[in-house]
Image (cartoon, helix red, strand yellow):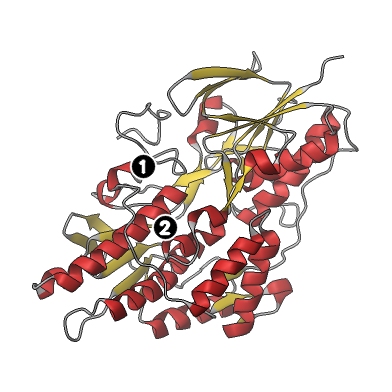
Amino acid sequence: MSRPRILIVGAGFAGYRTARTLSRITRGRAHIILLNPTDYFLYLPLLPQVAAGILEPRRVTVSLSDSLPDVRLVLGEADRIDLDDGTLHYTGPEGEEGSLSYDRLVLAAGSVNKLLPIPGVAEHAHGFRGLPEALYLRDHVTRQVELAASSEDPKACAARCTFVVVGAGYTGTEVAAHGQMFTDAQVRKHPLRRGMRPRWMLLDVAPRVLPEMDEKLSATADRVLRQRGVDVRMGTSVKEATHEGVVLTDGEFVETRTLVWCVGVRPDPLVESLGLPMEKGRLLVDPHLRVPGRPELFACGDVAAVPDLENPGSYTPMTAQHAWRHGKVAAENVAASLGLGGAHKPYRHRDLGFVVDLGGAKAAANPLGVTLSGVPAGAVTRGYHLAAMPGNRVRVAADWLLDAVLPRQAVQLGLVRSWSVPLDTSSPEVARVAGGPGRRQGADAR
């Protein structure tokens, strides 16, 4: 009897956990295929530390081939899914086309940068969803400080040392917090004109920083940011972006050469092409993560609208914590549908709390509902990340230790250029290369 074929699209938190759990459950009784644009799983929560020069890029990646030895890895991006024929068509990293058949399909393609119809943003802003964007931002910020230090023009110096972050959620808050520390350390080596220092601005239309979190944690993050010198402006966003700067919604023009877009994410546009019921861009699934009417199709992570059984009538939010748990339940239910595991299980969750790394020894955390700040929160935050990472724990801890005792190396590597990481791309995890194959049509079409 032939073994069933299970195809997983995406190796983010949900897809990686699905593949790992299925490999353990099936024990060779099924062909497990993982389609992903890169050969690694990316631990996104530590990406701001890559941009700030604390961690080396490979520290936040885990090799798929090494950690999933019983899973066949196929490098590529899904282009089209023929549900009736049970076939997925994809494009490889060098432009080659291919197709994969399946008996069970798990969609875990994740999310991409959320765009808003604001003039100039797509041309002048950069997102923060993948390693290429983090590497570009580190080079770009380093270059701006070095150019400002050598500038004779006070106006140009101020513009280059003004960094605008839009979006005060998890990512934007951490980018601004780490960025201020990173540039402050740089100017100690490359002093600016007298009386000048780097200026980081954090903007959001929400009434407070981290609006999705407990108010106490929000207040802690706001206090740390302001004490560090970050210009926090709530109820304010960008009205227009230009090469010289940004126009704020209150009418002020801020001269800057840096606009970091962290306003949120939206599901990968792949699921829109299926013609199935959606909920705000996410594929509707039942509590077992199966698409109604399609017994062979499962979805989890950011592309899936999963009913929140703890809050009837709502759906689980698009967070890494939920995606990781989705992956385990999806794997168990896929195996059960093939007769290779136990009974089907609905997705239920219990809130374990959240952590926000604010750089240095500062953080905001509420593990199991206990609100923490300062050094205790910093210790809990780093302990949580080490426990949650599926690999590279020793290397990450070693980089943290070295950062605590040695100065950071602020150098430009020049590996990623501005045009390689456009904001309106459906593949933020892959840097564009000159003359390379075209990417999936849709979100990345200018």
Asked where in the image residue 72 lies, by quadrant, the reply is top right
Q: Is residue 251 visible?
A: no
How far apart marks 1 and 2 lie (CA) works out to 13 Å
Is 130 displayed left or right of 378 in the figure? left
Give the total number of marks visible in the rendering: 2
Disc 1 residue type (three-letter): Asp
Quadrant where the image shows the N terminus = top right
**Residue 136 point in image, percent of width and height:** 35, 53
Quadrant housing residue 100 = top right
Secondary structure, mark 2, is: loop
Residue 123 coordinates in the image, percent (x, y): 25, 46
Q: Nearer the viewer, residue 42 or 242?
A: 42
Identify the element where label 1 is drawn: loop
The residue beneath circle 2 is: 262
Mark 2, Cα crowd under 10 Å, few <14 / some 14-19 / many 20+, is many
Amino acid at dot 2: Cys
Badge 1 crowding class, 10 Å Cα cut-off, few under 14, some 14 to 19, many 20 or more, is many
Query: In the rendering, at what x and y percent does residue 186 appear?
Result: 32, 74
Please tell me which residue is depicted at 61% across the width and 41% down the height of the picture: 11
Q: Is residue 124 left or right of residue 421?
A: left
Q: Is residue 180 left or right of residue 254?
A: right
- Pinpoint residue 133: horizontal percent, then vertical percent: 40, 51
Q: Name the mark on residue 424.
A: 1
Identify the residue at horizontal 57%, vertical 76% (top origin).
364
In the rendered image, the quadrant that contains the C terminus is: top left
Residue 333 in view of the camera? yes
Q: Quadrant of residue 24?
A: top right
Please state which of residues 440 and 143 is positioned toward the viewer in this rendering.
143
Q: Which residue is at a point 12% across and 72% down the rendered structure image?
A: 155
